[in-house]
Amino acid sequence: MKKVLAKCYIWLLLAMLYAPLLFIAIFSFTESRVLGNWTGFSTKLYTNLFSGGMNGGPSLLAAVENTLLIALIAAVFSTILGTVAAIGIFNLKGRKRQAMQFLNNIPMINPDIITGVSLFLLFVFLKFSQGYVTVILAHITFCTPYVVLSVMPKLSQMNPNIYEAALDLGATPGVALRKVLIPELRPGMISGFIMAFTMSLDDFAVTFFTRGTIGLDTLSTYIYTDARKGGLTPELRPLMTLIFLLVLVLLIIINIRRAKSDNIAK
């Protein structure tokens, strides 16, 4: 009975998580502006999305472009900074290492709204003109700790003598970093990059407080503004469906590669 109840609980939880996504995907194949009102099968919303003839017009496409560009830049820089920071933290000893790990965990536990307000006040104090630059800097700031968290386990699993052996054999620290450390840390770096990209893609609070008043919109802020007008643009339904499928495909590819690498290691 316990096993049956446990399975029922898991399936109920999964249904609650994925039913809304399935609901949106189904109603992305109808022209109705009202979600839940089926007016017949149609791919017009997808056609509007790719042709630009949508109700949201160029503003939605601009929001998608801004979201992807900011997420990509933030993910690249946070991966580099997070990897370097993880190596530095790993080489610390005793309480210094514990203290740095504790400080790295604080931004991840901290509510997004507090991070957003803090960065907003910092940029105002430094008299930064808010816009693309401040949003990207803010995204790099809150994404970097997640990369550190992804890379640290790979450092723990790595043989610590490999790097020292490379130096003893005549490699410079830079060459040893590129030829020894990075190949060993690559799986963690890829996981950190994907996590940073996803966190940046999903962020609302930090973006909202650091974008300024120049009209910069990401997908999350566009949806917020659109919802305040009394409804959502219908083309958002196929867009959400495509984003979900993209993330799903990426996760499947990552898991397949991880399974293959585990089999090779065995």
Image: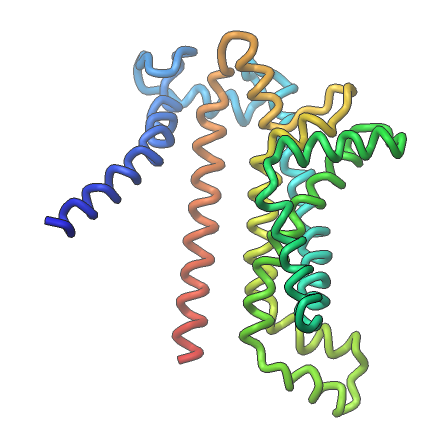
Across and down, in percent, residue 113 comes to 63, 31
Q: Is residue 196 above or below residue 262?
A: above
Across and down, in percent, residue 146 comes to 60, 52
Q: Is residue 66 visible?
A: no
| Residue at the image position 57 percent from the left and 77 percent from the top | 158
Side (left or right) of 141 relative to 233 = right
Q: Is residue 126 visible?
A: yes
| Residue at the image position 73 percent from the left and 34 percent from the top | 118
Q: Is residue 106 above or below residue 186?
A: above
Where residue 216 sits, quadrant-wise, is top right
* Residue nearer the viewer, 254 or 105: 105
Tally of numbered discs = 0
* Residue nearer the viewer, 75 or 11: 11
Across and down, in percent, residue 233 comes to 51, 16
Residue placed farthest to the top in the image? 230
Where residue 87 sits, quadrant-wise, is bottom right
Where residue 151 sits, quadrant-wise, is bottom right
| Residue at the image position 71 percent from the left and 58 percent from the top | 80
Residue placed farthest to the right in the image? 127
Side (left or right) of 88 relative to 30 = right
Colour mapping used in the image:
rainbow
Residue placed farthest to the front in the image? 95
Side (left or right) of 195 relative to 139 = left
* Residue nearer the viewer, 125 or 151: 125
| Residue at the image position 88 percent from the left and 34 percent from the top | 126
Q: In this view, does 99 lie above or below 162?
A: above
Residue placed farthest to the left in the image? 1
Quadrant assignment for the C terminus: bottom left
* Residue nearer the viewer, 241 or 98: 98
Across and down, in percent, residue 132 comes to 77, 33
